[in-house]
Amino acid sequence: HFKSSPAVTKSSGEIALVALGGYGRGEFYPFSDIDLLLLHDRRSGKYMQDVSESILYPLWDAGFDVGHSVRTVKDTIRFAREDFIFQVSLIDARFLTGSKSLFEELTTRYKKKILEGKRLKFVQTMDLFRFERRKKYGSHSYLLEPHIKEGKGGMRDIQAMIWVSKALFGITGLDQMEESGLLASEDRQAFEDSWNMLARIRNKLHYFSKRKNDQLVFEYQEEMAEAFGYQDTKAMLGVEHFMRQVYGHMQTIAVVTDLFFEHIHEVQGRSIFKEKEKQLEKHIVVRNNYIHLSQSDILETNPSLLMRLYLHSAKTNYPLHHRTRQLVTRNLHLVDEKFRVSKRIAKVFLELLVHAVNPMDTLESMLETGLLTAYLPEYGGVESLAQHDLYHIYTVDRHQLQAVLELSRLRASEKDIFLSLPSEHLVYLAALLHDIGKGKHADHSELGASMVVAIGKRLGLDEEETACLSFLVRFHLFLPENALRRDLEDHEFIRQSAEIIGDIDRLAMLYLLTIADSRATGPSAWSDWKATLLSEMYLKVKSCLEEQCVAPESIKDQAQGEEQGITWLQNRVQELLQGKVETRLSVDQLPDDYLLSFSPELVSKHLEIHGTEKARLQQQVLIFPEEKKGFGSLLIMSKDRPGLLAKVFGVLAYHNLNVLAAQIFTWPDSTVVDVLDVMPATDNYFSEIDFEAVQKDINQAVNYRFDVSSKLSSKLKSYNYLPKKKVQQLEQRVVIDNEISSRFTVIEVYCSDRPGTLYQLAQMIADFGLDIHRAKIATEVEQLIDFFYVTTRDKMKITDPDLKQKVHDSLLHVVQEVAVIA
């Protein structure tokens, strides 16, 4: 209809309709943009508004998302010089209709003005865009929610390769690329298959999302797996198998396109720089910042060079040249049982693991060539394995490589701990292998601990080292799980932890492994708050081990030592208070567990407030905020009132404050002293919170002039609250335990995370006449895990089976209601 359009026919000049971008390439998906260029000469300029309206309005009316520009050839070339993205879109320009001569003028000028003499700059700019894209969408193709278009190994990597081959050499299509040597014949079919698979996935994603969506988020993964025919088996879920295939295809594209760009840089480098070569050892050289084998046939007679290549790469931070990587892959048959049990090769492997400048790059290259899984066959079980849990962002294999990288980064910040280690290679091995037992539908820590025994023996570790490696894998979750959930003031718990860990060296390695594992997991798994708790638990267990607190005679003396400690604390507090303020309670009246929970300086501060604010404390709830690194602390003092803690939790949620932990004490005169660690739920800083308003609302709540439940409900409705991210395997359960703590019943609650949940749970506990003495709140993406340390009003554990069952059922009802609302 273009040529017959009245607006076009009355034009006196030349006009061409040109398709750009994906539409120009003929790559169109259900919700793709239509990118058009209306090209015209000077004589047609005054008619172009009518022409563009006659073309665009029908497309808009039909629901298409149309991007367009109206330009002369000269303007088009001028804008292409200024805007690289537009410049690239012109590579895909396709003539649709109108003046063919005008379109040919554009293509001729484009080659002459944009490409000729500037091809090196074109590649450099494309490299910069690839770098920025990977920084934004992920530096490798193993994110659990991969971006099919922009992520590493996605459609944009394919397009970048084709754009460069067309701009530099005028080559289009895979056939011509293969014929010219830009694409290796052995890679051609796999690359084409992967490209086709990504196109099918992107097509389905658009249909399922009913919009332009190119990220394979959890929400669609099961549906996609089913659509592609993947079914559950005993060994693996259908969605896990599907995602493993997706990662494999994206990795194929990532590797082939990276090889292509390496080749381009090498070709361009030869024309600019003279090749410089340095021998690293016999048969291994570095040339133009790449490591090469000097003889392609030397591997057959000297297989150890396979590992030594990577040792040099690790130490120099130079990558293996792509031809050398191909040689490694072609010679994996040399990695036999003799190779795997060689102590000489094991020594090389451990050296590169511990001393790599950038272990992620080195190990990922070993994984891509197949050397890592050939040397450690057990690693093949987690290669490209998706983990559909709460907060991992990488597949299992890449997560473990990232853990090794994070461990190496700790050398600077935890220098003293590293220097104290007798066998640092063990903690590096543990980082590389800690999740090796995943994907078998069993306890991965226990299974992994047994699997690494065989690995340790093959690597030549002695019996004690092998046992230590197995221990680290078995207990790699011990510190994070307990630091965030248990009462670190419970001396018996610290003693039991010390007994499990056994010695200071194991504790140090476990601590380093925990930090590396958490940081490698993803942003939601690490915070200043978690770092503080881990450090506190590490130091307390370390102190316990140094004092041999697990010895029987130490256990006997524990009560006596604690009594002496309380006496010292009382004396120290009295010294600090002397002559400052008249207190209304003597120090020896304060509860022992309260005194043991705070420093003498904090206890004296609480007593000062208790003396100076006597009248206000009888009438009001007072809040004293203190900012700490990464979180804040609230001291809350008041006369005891029914349901006080629940109301505090509710008002804090109303003011966008998440409670991380709480210590709750009541003095003999019914003064409540609560210390809550909190963190803003929004992007606000702690110092920006209006604590005067918080205090006012808490006081109104305890006087029944602020309906917490109603206020929170209205807030959720007005903000149209939705979970931040859909995840799988959210737990909904309640556990009541009398064994964990010597003094308290511990109630564990697992539920969906939404504002006000903590208030509802605390209110329910208060309704049963139970006192909360401690609370730990761990939030993992959507999953809320609350730990309440409670007693009955007479300071006893919950021993009545009927009461225990009623508490359990009532809290579970709250959990299930929250799940329905969320």
Image (cartoon, rainbow, N blue to C red):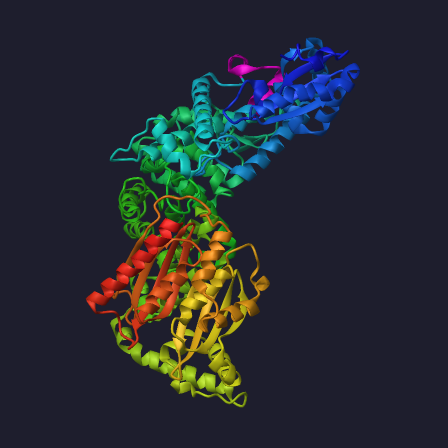
Left-right relation of 195 to 64: left
> Which residue is depicted at the point 28% across and 40% down?
440
Q: Quadrant of the N terminus?
A: top right
Res 501 → quadrant: bottom left
Q: Is residue 749 visible?
A: yes
Residue 432, magenta (yes or no): no
- Residue 730 location in percent, x, y? 35, 48
Of the pair 80 and 772, the residue shown nearer to us: 772
Left-right relation of 61 to 797: right
Left-right relation of 495 to 154: left
Of the pair 630 and 227, the residue shown nearer to us: 227
Of the pair 170 and 542, the residue shown nearer to us: 170
> Which residue is depicted at the point 30% across and 50% down?
470
Q: Which residues are magenta?
A: 160-181
Is residue 286 placed above or below 34 in the rendered structure? below
- Residue 515 location in percent, x, y? 44, 53
> Which residue is depicted at the point 30% across and 33% down?
338
Is residue 34 placed above or below 215 in the rendered structure? above
The count of marks equals 0
- Residue 555 location in percent, x, y? 27, 73
Res 89 → quadrant: top right
Q: Is residue 502 visible?
A: no
Of the pair 516 and 455, the residue shown nearer to us: 516
- Residue 395 location in percent, x, y? 40, 39
> Which residue is depicted at the point 68% across and 24% down?
69
Most common SS among magenta residues:
helix
